[in-house]
Image: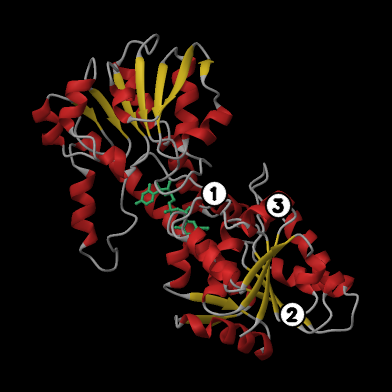
Amino acid sequence: MYKIAVAGTGYVGLVAGVCFAEVGHQVTCVDIDEAKVNLMKSGVSPIYETSLEELMQKNYAAGRIDYTTDFKSAYKDADAIFIGVGTPEQPDGSANLSYIATVARQIAESVEKDCLVVVKSTVPVGTNDKVEQFIQDFLVNGVRVEVASNPEFLAQGSAVQDTLHAERIVIGTESKWAEDLLMKIYEPFHLPIVSVNRRSAEMIKYASNDFLALKISYMNDIANLCELVGADIQDVAKGMSYDERIGSKFLNAGIGYGGSCFPKDTKALEYIARQNGYELKTIKAAIDVNKEQKTMLYKKASKSLITFNLLKVAVLGLTFKPGTDDLREAASLENIPLLLEQGANIFAYDPVGAENFSKVHPEGKGGRGSITYVSNIEHALQDANVCFIFTEWGEVKAVTPENYKDLMRTPLVYDGRNLYRLEDMQNAGVEYHSIGRKS
Ligand code: UGA
């Protein structure tokens, strides 16, 4: 078993650290935020993620994981240091690498024995060459330090499961020593390992995420056409999914992809292409479709309603997908300001995302309208004039067509996640508008 340090305790770093401990490695997670470190030591996860807290507590009690702000003590004798800090998007679409640079510098100044630095954060192709050079330039002790790429493919909401049972581990190395060490670190996971060079590994991450984003945008594009020609996107997707070359996953049309990854990684790859004098037309198209898709429902509703002014508008779901409290690039963030501007009195329900949303849009007056956060769906729907569905939480799916009919003043539903069968809504007497299907 190996001594592993993990830099950054966000989704990528913390989940990786906990899973390395779970398979028996000795792990120290490093973060600059002391309050967060104390929280984690007390067994509380700073992120909402199924079974993460349980594994944090179990491995902490077993002495296999610890948390610290003292990077020097964590890095000095580690066999491998995994970097999982953020690479946020900059206004031009490029990735901000300053957190990676800070960690690389700290590593260079701390390591006292040969060690492998493994970059898990999503970074532009070629970055790890630079990180290695950077560490060499600042290295204090004459030890061997190499950099490997090991992109992360976990999705929020199923992060632990995705890591412990990943479909593949991708490692990008430039020497046999680095390849062998990473292989051994991952051996206890018993998962397929794809071993390639560093630049290919970096590219696999972008190419995978961008392909999925492209797949979603393609389905959204086809959905919009379905509406115009009288086809049904769900039937179309079903018919497509039987072809194994297409597959059944990520074929759901909706209100566009959100989250911290697809929006960022599509723009980043498009930027990388531009920097290299190449125009990535497919990804540019995916970005364009996604931008328009996010307000598709609002535009539909504005066409048929004369005004939102003084209407009670129920909003079901605020997060970018279920199973997370993350709001980044969520469709709700685009639509709610538009509704408020038009004078809507919004009653918003989300099982975990309301608190975060209220930091952006505090309860009370907003624009010409107002927003109120409610903890039960009935309260949101009661006497509402119109309802928007933005996230497919289980609690939202459990609302029946009859509930809309019985609770709302006018049963008018705009559904961005295609949760209901058209005939069920029609039979219940609900006016129902969704994506890529007949209204
Ligand atoms: C995504 C990838 O799925 C992970 O493999 C990757 O590791 C991660 O980014 C990352 O780079 O860190 P995540 O952003 O957590 O994971 O969420 P997804 O489940 O992929 O969903 C992204 C967005 O696409 C959501 O807004 C979701 O509602 C939307 N989506 C997904 C659709 O609109 N239709 C679909 O069929 C599937």
Instruction: Name the foreground residue: 427 vs 42.
Output: 42
Instruction: Name the foreground residue: 91 vs 342.
Output: 342
The quadrant where residue 244 appears: bottom left
The amino acid pointed to by label 1 is Ser
Classify mark 1: helix, strand or loop: loop
Q: Is mark 2 within 8 Å of ligand 1?
A: no
How many numbered markers are drawn? Answer: 3
Task: Measure the C-alpha gap from mark 1 to mark 2.
Answer: 29 Å
Residue 323 against residue 146 in the figure, above or below: above
The quadrant where residue 352 appears: top left
Instruction: Kindly check if marks 2 and 3 are in contact, taking CB atoms under 8 A apart as contact.
Output: no
Mark 3 or mark 1: name the one nearer the start of the chain: 3
Task: Name the residue tied to disc 3.
Answer: 96
Residue 126, image x and y in percent? 69, 68
Instruction: Kindly check if marks 1 and 2 are in contact, taking CB atoms under 8 A apart as contact.
Output: no
393 vs 170, left or right, is left
Task: Measure the C-alpha gap from mark 3 to mark 1.
Answer: 14 Å
Mark 2 or mark 3: name the one nearer the start of the chain: 3
**Which residue is found at the position 28% from the left and 26% from the top?**
378
Residue 64, image x and y in percent? 61, 74
Residue 212 against residue 145 in the figure, above or below: above
Task: Measure the C-alpha gap from mark 2 to mark 3.
Answer: 22 Å
Pointer 3: residues within 10 angstroms few (<14), some, or many (20+)?
some
Residue 184, image x and y in percent? 58, 87
The amino acid pointed to by label 3 is Asn
- Residue 401 visible in the current orientation: yes
In the picture, the disc for residue 240 is none
The amino acid pointed to by label 2 is Glu
Task: Name the residue tied to disc 2.
Answer: 146
Instruction: Kindly check if marks 3 and 1 are in contact, taking CB atoms under 8 A apart as contact.
Output: no
Task: Name the residue tied to disc 1.
Answer: 260
Pointer 2: residues within 10 angstroms few (<14), some, or many (20+)?
many
